[in-house]
Image (cartoon, helix red, strand yellow):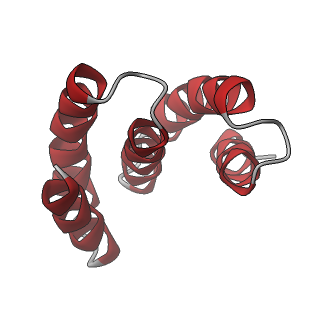
Amino acid sequence: MAARHGHAVNLGAAGERAEAARLLDAVVRDSVGVLGADHPDTLTARFNLAVNLGAAGERAEAARLLDAVVQDSVRVLGADHPDTLTSRRAQQFFEGK
């Protein structure tokens, strides 16, 4: 799962955002099933899925997904955790704030 996640992130960084999002969607589903919805790796995969969707032009969907990631990150990691803050900034970016 980690290799698939890394491969998808690298595809996204290379500009293949839609393909990265497609692969990350599968990683998120598998991560939820294996690690659980609250596992930090699952939260990271959800974040990366949202960012790649947003970069592929699906800004509203990215913001919606990031809202859920932020809420879960606050609950699991805390409001001041660096991952929570990064997710919040990305959410605001895709919301146009």
Number of marks in the rendered image = 0
Residue 58 location in percent, x, y?
Answer: 42, 40
Residue 91 location in percent, x, y?
Answer: 67, 42
Q: Is residue 51 above or below residue 38?
A: below
Which quadrant of the structure image shows residue 9?
bottom left
Looking at the image, which residue is at 43% across and 56% down?
A: 55
Q: Is residue 26 above or below residue 47?
A: above
Residue most extreme to the bottom = 14
Looking at the image, which residue is at 26% across and 33% down?
A: 31
Looking at the image, which residue is at 81% across and 46% down?
A: 97
Q: Is residue 80 above or below residue 71?
A: below
Q: Is residue 65 above or below residue 53?
A: above
Residue 37 location in percent, x, y?
Answer: 41, 22
Determine whether, in the image, residue 51 is placed left or right of residue 21: right
Determine whether, in the image, residue 44 is placed left or right of residue 94: left
Towards the viewer: 22 or 71 = 71
Residue 2 location in percent, x, y?
Answer: 22, 56
Looking at the image, which residue is at 46% across and 47% down?
A: 44
